[in-house]
Amino acid sequence: MVPKNEGTIDKNVKISNVLRIGKGTQILEGSVLQGPSIIGENCTIGPQTYIGPYTSIGDGSTITNSEIQNSIIMEDASIECDELITNSVIGRNVVITKNNEPPKGKRFIIGDQSKVTI
Protein backbone atom coordinates (compact mmCIF):
# COMPACT_ATOMS: atom_id res chain seq x y z
CA MET A 1 0.00 0.00 0.00
CA VAL A 2 1.28 3.46 -0.90
CA PRO A 3 0.79 6.20 1.73
CA LYS A 4 -1.50 9.02 0.68
CA ASN A 5 -3.05 11.96 2.54
CA GLU A 6 -5.79 14.02 0.90
CA GLY A 7 -7.39 15.12 4.18
CA THR A 8 -6.49 17.58 6.95
CA ILE A 9 -4.64 16.65 10.11
CA ASP A 10 -4.73 18.80 13.28
CA LYS A 11 -1.75 19.43 15.55
CA ASN A 12 -0.98 16.81 18.20
CA VAL A 13 -2.00 13.88 16.00
CA LYS A 14 0.38 10.92 16.00
CA ILE A 15 0.71 8.89 12.83
CA SER A 16 2.84 5.80 12.29
CA ASN A 17 3.26 3.33 9.44
CA VAL A 18 1.42 3.49 6.12
CA LEU A 19 -1.95 5.25 5.97
CA ARG A 20 -4.30 6.35 3.20
CA ILE A 21 -6.56 9.26 4.11
CA GLY A 22 -9.28 10.30 1.65
CA LYS A 23 -10.36 13.73 0.40
CA GLY A 24 -12.31 15.87 2.84
CA THR A 25 -11.40 13.72 5.86
CA GLN A 26 -10.48 15.51 9.09
CA ILE A 27 -8.20 13.97 11.72
CA LEU A 28 -8.79 15.90 14.94
CA GLU A 29 -6.47 16.75 17.83
CA GLY A 30 -5.29 14.06 20.21
CA SER A 31 -5.90 11.20 17.79
CA VAL A 32 -3.43 8.38 17.11
CA LEU A 33 -3.40 6.54 13.78
CA GLN A 34 -1.33 3.44 13.26
CA GLY A 35 -1.17 1.81 9.86
CA PRO A 36 -1.49 -0.02 7.74
CA SER A 37 -4.97 1.47 7.58
CA ILE A 38 -7.29 3.17 5.11
CA ILE A 39 -9.67 6.01 5.97
CA GLY A 40 -12.20 6.97 3.29
CA GLU A 41 -13.39 10.34 2.05
CA ASN A 42 -15.32 12.90 4.11
CA CYS A 43 -14.71 11.17 7.45
CA THR A 44 -14.19 12.77 10.85
CA ILE A 45 -11.75 10.98 13.13
CA GLY A 46 -11.36 12.31 16.68
CA PRO A 47 -10.78 14.02 18.85
CA GLN A 48 -9.07 11.56 21.20
CA THR A 49 -9.50 8.57 18.88
CA TYR A 50 -7.20 5.62 18.19
CA ILE A 51 -7.27 3.93 14.79
CA GLY A 52 -5.07 0.86 14.95
CA PRO A 53 -3.49 -1.29 12.29
CA TYR A 54 -5.43 -3.32 9.75
CA THR A 55 -8.45 -1.04 9.89
CA SER A 56 -10.56 0.24 7.00
CA ILE A 57 -13.06 3.06 7.53
CA GLY A 58 -15.69 3.77 4.85
CA ASP A 59 -16.57 7.15 3.36
CA GLY A 60 -18.61 9.55 5.47
CA SER A 61 -17.93 7.81 8.80
CA THR A 62 -17.41 9.58 12.13
CA ILE A 63 -15.30 7.98 14.87
CA THR A 64 -15.05 9.97 18.12
CA ASN A 65 -13.47 9.16 21.50
CA SER A 66 -13.12 5.51 20.53
CA GLU A 67 -10.48 2.88 19.76
CA ILE A 68 -10.75 0.78 16.60
CA GLN A 69 -8.28 -1.83 15.39
CA ASN A 70 -8.19 -4.78 13.01
CA SER A 71 -11.71 -3.94 11.83
CA ILE A 72 -13.78 -2.93 8.81
CA ILE A 73 -16.14 0.02 9.29
CA MET A 74 -18.41 0.55 6.29
CA GLU A 75 -19.81 3.83 4.93
CA ASP A 76 -21.57 6.45 7.04
CA ALA A 77 -21.01 4.71 10.38
CA SER A 78 -21.02 6.79 13.56
CA ILE A 79 -19.08 5.50 16.57
CA GLU A 80 -18.66 7.34 19.88
CA CYS A 81 -18.27 4.88 22.70
CA ASP A 82 -14.99 5.28 24.71
CA GLU A 83 -14.39 1.57 24.04
CA LEU A 84 -11.96 -0.67 22.21
CA ILE A 85 -13.59 -2.25 19.17
CA THR A 86 -11.43 -4.97 17.66
CA ASN A 87 -11.71 -7.76 15.08
CA SER A 88 -15.07 -6.40 13.93
CA VAL A 89 -17.10 -5.83 10.77
CA ILE A 90 -19.56 -2.94 11.10
CA GLY A 91 -22.08 -2.22 8.33
CA ARG A 92 -23.29 0.93 6.61
CA ASN A 93 -25.14 3.61 8.60
CA VAL A 94 -24.47 1.85 11.91
CA VAL A 95 -24.56 4.00 15.07
CA ILE A 96 -22.65 2.85 18.17
CA THR A 97 -22.90 4.97 21.31
CA LYS A 98 -21.79 4.49 24.91
CA ASN A 99 -23.76 3.25 27.84
CA ASN A 100 -22.38 4.01 31.33
CA GLU A 101 -20.79 0.62 32.04
CA PRO A 102 -17.03 0.20 32.71
CA PRO A 103 -14.92 -0.04 29.50
CA LYS A 104 -14.25 -3.48 28.01
CA GLY A 105 -13.14 -4.68 24.59
CA LYS A 106 -15.99 -5.42 22.21
CA ARG A 107 -16.26 -7.52 19.05
CA PHE A 108 -19.01 -6.89 16.51
CA ILE A 109 -20.44 -8.13 13.26
CA ILE A 110 -23.26 -5.66 12.66
CA GLY A 111 -25.41 -5.37 9.54
CA ASP A 112 -26.31 -2.28 7.56
CA GLN A 113 -28.45 0.47 9.13
CA SER A 114 -28.22 -0.92 12.68
CA LYS A 115 -28.19 1.11 15.90
CA VAL A 116 -26.28 -0.21 18.93
CA THR A 117 -25.91 1.19 22.43
CA ILE A 118 -23.14 -0.34 24.53
Image: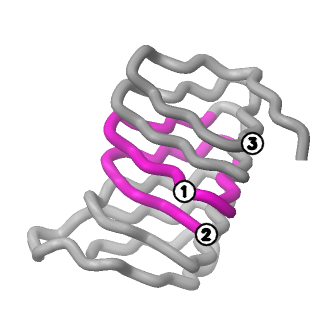
The residue that mark 2 highlights is 70
Q: Quadrant of the C terminus?
A: bottom left
Q: For mark 1, does the 10 Å Cα neighbourhood hold few (<14), some (14 to 19), or many (20 or more) residues?
A: many
Q: For mark 3, does the 10 Å Cα neighbourhood hold few (<14), some (14 to 19), or many (20 or more) residues?
A: some
Viewer-nearest of labels 3 and 2?
3
Q: Is residue 15 magenta?
A: no
Q: Which mark is residue 52?
A: 1
Q: Tell me whether the residue at label 1 lies in contact with that at label 2, contact meaning CB atoms closer than 8 angstroms.
A: yes
Q: Which amino acid does the dot numbered 1 rest on? A: Gly
Q: Is residue 97 left or right of residue 113?
A: left
The alpha-carbon separation of the residues under discs 3 and 1 comes to 11 Å
Colour convention: one colour
Q: Is residue 63 above or below residue 99?
A: above
The residue that mark 3 highlights is 18
Q: In the rendering, at what x and y percent does residue 53 appear?
A: 62, 58
Q: In the rendering, at what x and y percent does residue 44 appear?
A: 51, 34
Residue at x-position 42% and y-position 15% = 11
Q: Earlier in the sequence, mark 1 or mark 2?
A: 1
Q: Is residue 30 above or below residue 111?
A: above
Please give the range of residues in magenta: 43-70
Q: Which amino acid does the dot numbered 2 rest on? A: Asn
Residue at x-position 89% and y-position 39% = 2
Q: Is residue 43 above or below residue 53?
A: above
